Structures are given as structure tokens and as C-alpha cells.
Amino acid sequence: MNIDVMPIPYSDVKNWLLHKHYARRMSPVSYSFGGYRGNELIGVVTFGTPSSSSLRCGICGEQYKDIVIELNRLCCENSKNIASLLVGRAIKLINKPAIIVSYADTGQGHIGYIYQATNFIYTGLSAKRTDWKIKGLEHLHGATIADKSRGIKNRAAWMREKYGDDFYLQDRPLKHRYVYFIGSKKQKKEMFAALKYPITEYPKGESKHYDTGEQARTQLRLL
């Protein structure tokens, strides 16, 4: 398949993700790549440092936390082949060594076949957590709701005072967790040995494709 993958500006990524990705919000971006068919942008993928120190340490331990990055957004034309090609080629452009973690959201019907096709390691389901919700705003991501009280000392109390009974907690759907190591043969061997999660067989099942139905602005590559 004749698709070129290369770094692209944040502005091009933002346009795609805010219109086409189900989360409708940006994540921290350290690397952003686009896939082009000819000079037309047909997909984007981003990687960023997870804000959670426990997540970074939880993969391979404290000594590796500074090289953990998350594949946090992937959005492209409705084709598994395009998505796996975009991810596979983007990984090769990331500075080494690095530990990449990514999640497939069961709440959206995702299995993670793209990560399976690109040889990620499957390490089971994420831990149980809850999200903040507000009645009437259920379409908003839990992190978007939490952002409303960012910087406030007692955030939960503030939310309850502001929204009353409309503020509630909801169990977060579990996520399939995938891990990928990049580096020299020796580095990958050492990271593999330090992995804290058990490696299990790939999950199977019907995977759903999600699209907001909106059209992202078509960005052409400048030749």
C-alpha cells in the first residue's frame, strides 16, 4: 500500500482528532504523525508522556518511567490495514529506547486488533476505576468533566456543591492494555525482563469502528 508516514504539525492533528475521534479532546502530544496517500492526509496518530507517574512506573518499574510514552490517539480512514500501517511506520520514527503503551477501550467495542497486527504485547485489562459524570452531559469524556475543577483544592466537594445530585460517579469501562518495546536488541531484552504485567493471549471478538460522522478539513502535503 503506497502510504507515506511522517511527522506533522500539531494544528493538523488537532483538526482531525477534535472532529473525527470519539473522545473529542486532545491528549499530551510528544510525537504526531500523519499518513498520506499521495499528498492527501488520510490518518493521524499521536504519542505523549502519560501524566500518571503510577502508570509510567507500572509498566517496567521506576528505572524505566522516563521512557514510557502512550499511543494516545489514532484516527484514520475506516481500514484496519491503513491503521496498522500508520502505527507500524510511526513507531519506527520515535526516539529510542522507548516503551510504548496503548489501550483499546472496551466501552467503545474496541479489541485492539491494530496493535495485534503490529506485534504489541498484550498484558490484560486495566484496573477498575471510576469517572466523574454530570447528568445531561454524559456525552463528555470523564477527563473533560474533571477539567472543570482543575486547580481547585477540594475538587470533588466543589463539583458536588456546583452540580448537586447531577454530579455522580460511573464505573469506567475496562481497557485492553498493549505494550511495545523499541531499542537495541539488548535494550529490548532488558525491558522485556523488567515487564511487571503478565503476558497473555490476544483477546478476540467483534470490534466496532467509531466515527463521529464529521468531516475533518482535508490537509494536503506541501510538495
Image (cartoon, helix red, strand yellow):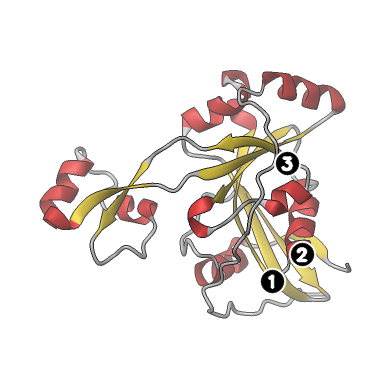
Does the CB distance between marks 1 and 3 fall below 8 Å? no
Horizontal and vertical percent position of residue 27: 51, 52
Cα–Cα span, label 3 and label 2: 17 Å
Q: Nearer the viewer, residue 111 or 102?
A: 111
Number of the label disc, if any, that sits on residue 82? 2
Name the spot of residue 146 as percent of width and height, x first: 31, 50
Q: Earlier in the sequence, mark 3 or mark 2?
A: 2
Counting residues from the N terminus, which is met first, the one under dot 1 or under dot 2? 1
Is there a contact, CB below 8 Å, between mark 1 and mark 2?
yes
SS of the residue under disc 3 = loop
Left or right: 193 with respect to 146? right
* Side (left or right) of 50 relative to 189: left
CB contact under 8 Å: marks 3 and 2: no
Q: Is residue 189 left or right of residue 108?
A: right
Q: Amino acid at mark 3?
A: Phe
Instruction: Name the residue: 61% across, 26% down.
Output: 197
Mark 1 vs mark 2, CA separation in Å? 7 Å
Q: What element does badge 1 sit on?
A: loop
Residue 179: x percent and y percent? 67, 37
Q: Is residue 11 left or right of residue 184?
A: left
Tag shown at residue 120: 3
Residue furthest right as drawn: 2
On-image quarter of the C terminus:
bottom right
Q: Residue at x 52, y 45 (%)?
A: 175
The residue under label 2 is which amino acid type? Ile
Mark 1 / mark 3, whichever is N-terminal: 1
Viewer-side residue, 49 vs 128: 128
Q: Amino acid at mark 1?
A: Glu
Q: Residue furthest front?
A: 205
Say which of 68 and 88 sits in front.
Answer: 88
Name the residue that disc number 1 marks: 77
